[in-house]
Amino acid sequence: MHRHHRAVIDAELRRLARRAPSLSPADLDVVNTALEELAESAILAPLRNAPRDTAILLTRIFGQPGNGSRRLNATLND
């Protein structure tokens, strides 16, 4: 999940930089930090704290077919 959220944030930062060229690198760093904190609190922390017996359900939602719960656990710890 960490790699996936990072890819989304990076894509959004690139899009924002194109649409608002007046933003400085410092401005984009502020946006990056805010998006990282949001992803951590809204997505990553709840997934990390999910009971282990829900791993198969989370795999069905977020995993690739055939990855199994081992893949989800590896993903959550990335």
Image: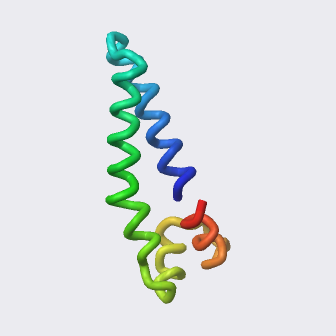
Task: Give residue 33's position: percent from left, percent from top.
Answer: 38, 39
Task: Give residue 39's position: percent from left, percent from top.
Answer: 38, 52
Residue for point 52% across, 80% down: 55
- Please, is residue 37 above or below residue 71 in the view? above
Task: Give residue 2's position: percent from left, percent from top.
Answer: 53, 55
Compared across the picture, whether 12 is left or right of 76 comes to: left
Instruction: State which quadrant residue 68 falls in.
Output: bottom right
Q: In the displayed image of the protein, which residue is found farthest to the top?
A: 22
Q: How is the image coloured?
A: rainbow
Viewer-proximal residue, 65 or 48? 48
Compared across the picture, whether 32 is left or right of 74 comes to: left
Indicate the quadrant containing the C terminus: top left, top right, bottom left or bottom right: bottom right
Task: Give residue 67's position: percent from left, percent from top.
Answer: 66, 72
Residue for point 46% across, 26% down: 14
- Please, is residue 24 above or below residue 55 in the view? above
Instruction: State which quadrant residue 47 falls in.
Output: bottom left
Residue for point 49% across, 89% down: 53
Count of labels in the image: 0
Instruction: State which quadrant residue 32 falls in.
Output: top left
Residue for point 52% across, 58% down: 1
- Please, is residue 37 above or below residue 28 in the view? below
Viewer-proximal residue, 16 or 26? 26
